Image: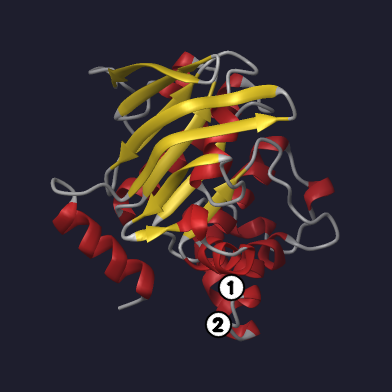
Amino acid sequence: MTVAAALRADSDAEMNRSPLLSARSVVVSYGRTPALRGVTMSVGGGEIVAVTGASGSGKSTLLLCLAGILRPDVGEVRFGDRVISAESEAARSRLRRREFGVLFQFGQLVPELSAVENVALPLLLSGVRRRPATTAALEWLDRFGIADLADSRPPQMSGGQGQRVAVARAMVTEPVVVFADEPTGALDTLAGEQVLAQLVRVTREAGTTVILVTHDTRVAAYADREVVIRDGMLDEVATGSSDRPTS
């Protein structure tokens, strides 16, 4: 069993007793401008949580803190028993490589690399040998129905195709948590729905926790729960729509 699978099994057992990921009284400012003002929230194993709010509300900053990319000025972020906000940058980088997957609005694929090389990259950076890393990457491309794009480079792909490659890259390490920041924001409605449906399908099958930042109510409807951020504060928590789209 992989470390990610073991942690996921542990998180399932503990879901009702302790959160998998949590923020406590998190404060972040950019100079004199406050971005988060004492946000406290928790996420259980296997949950899909949408973080919504207006542009500039602090939702992307919250994601960066939860993913260990940004350290809060005040407060703490926990992943299981680890206070990751107190760890070194090197330790947080290892955590992101091994246990977290990150998906951004524009995919951020390496334009000089083929699709299969982009997907294999996180494994290679973690020390996996090229052949098994490539095999795993091809399997994930196939799961998203884009194995025929394995040798194509990002400039040769449509926006939807490129974002599916980015989702495959985020999932190839079998992460415990996937952080998705406006993953469909650069796509048209049809392509966005296709990418989102596939993301939800594969993460639910794997039991992966998803933190989904969006300003789009149609995207938030795919989540189990919605956390609303307003002016850097937790404004309200709403349950997911009972008629949310199925994947």
Nearer to the camera, 167 or 149: 167
Q: Nearer the viewer, mark 2 or mark 1?
A: 1
Residue 25 occupies quadrant: top left
Nearer to the camera, 75 or 118: 75
Residue 51 occupies quadrant: top left
Residue under the image location 67 percent in, 68 percent down: 121
Q: Position of residue 178 (x, y in %)?
A: 47, 49
Residue under the image location 28 percent in, 70 percent down: 6
In the displayed structure, 135 sits above or below 5; it is below
Q: Amino acid at mark 2?
A: Pro
Q: Residues within 10 Å of mark 2 (few under 14, many from 20)?
A: few
Nearer to the camera, 60 or 48: 60
In the displayed structure, 17 sits above or below 197; it is below
Say if mark 2 contacts mark 1, CB within 8 Å: yes
**Figure coloring:** secondary structure
Q: Which residue is mark 1?
A: 123
Q: Position of residue 227 (x, y in %)?
A: 39, 23
Residue under the image location 32 percent in, 57 percent down: 80
Q: Which residue is mark 2?
A: 132
Q: Position of residue 54 (x, y in %)?
A: 58, 13
Query: Which numbered dot is residue 212?
Result: none
Instruction: Report the side of 61 relative to 30 (left or right).
Output: left
Q: Quadrant of the N terminus?
A: bottom left
Nearer to the camera, 47 or 166: 47
Mark 1 or mark 2, which is nearer the start of the sequence? 1
